[in-house]
Image: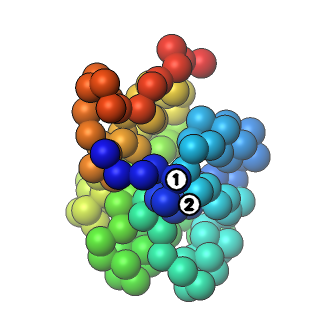
């Protein structure tokens, strides 16, 4: 299994509670946070992330714009979209950019960890070498 401590993840959400929650859940990775789409794009201009987890509905610059920018700049970066507004339109638009997963809020710790591990190709969560998951929130 690859060393998860070497994986860089960008968490983008305008809700501070969600950013902090995801950073805590993914504490064994290198996690960077952005409070909105503008900040995310600025961070993406500086460097590449293995995985981007972004909310869809944010002020000024949407998650869809973050997804589009990230995939154009770094086509091999993996993306997970999270949203409290899981519309079919949003899902189809982002999946067209090669998004790995679309999770509706609220989601459990197990769900996000499983999607992160799957997106990064880190192995089967049920295998002895997989990441140990908490029961949920």
- Residue that protrudes farthest toward the right in the picture: 16
Residue located at (61% from left, 55% from top): 31
Residue 57 is situated, as x and y percent measured from the top left of the image, at 56, 53
Q: Which residue is mark 1?
A: 5
Foreground residue, 73 or 133? Answer: 133
Residue 123 is situated, as x and y percent measured from the top left of the image, at 26, 40
| In the rendered image, the vertical position of residue 128 relative to residue 84, given as above or below | above
Which part of the image, by quadrant, shows the N terminus? Answer: top left
Residue 78 is situated, as x and y percent measured from the top left of the image, at 35, 60
Residues packed near mark 1 inside 10 Å, few (<14), some (14 to 19) or many (20 plus): few
Which part of the image, by quadrant, shows the C terminus? Answer: top right
Foreground residue, 31 or 104? Answer: 31
Query: By what rule are the colours in the image chosen?
Result: rainbow
Q: Which residue is mark 2?
A: 10
| In the rendered image, the vertical position of residue 77 relative to residue 136, given as above or below | below
Residues packed near mark 2 inside 10 Å, few (<14), some (14 to 19) or many (20 plus): many
The answer, for residue 64, to whether it is visible in the render is: no
Residue 69 is situated, as x and y percent measured from the top left of the image, at 44, 78
């Amino acid at each position: 299994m690859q060393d998860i401590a070497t994986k860089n993840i960008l968490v983008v959400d305008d809700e501070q509670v969600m950013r902090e929650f995801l950073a805590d859940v993914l504490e064994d990775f290198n996690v960077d946070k952005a409070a909105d789409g503008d900040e995310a794009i600025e961070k993406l201009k500086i460097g590449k992330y293995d995985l981007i987890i972004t909310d869809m509905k944010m002020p000024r610059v949407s998650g869809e714009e973050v997804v589009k920018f990230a995939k154009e700049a770094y086509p091999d970066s993996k993306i997970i979209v999270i949203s409290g507004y899981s519309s079919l339109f949003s899902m189809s638009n982002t999946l067209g950019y090669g998004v790995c997963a679309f999770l509706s809020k609220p989601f459990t710790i197990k769900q996000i960890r499983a999607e992160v591990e799957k997106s990064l190709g880190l192995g089967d969560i049920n295998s002895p070498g997989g990441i140990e998951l908490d029961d949920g929130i």
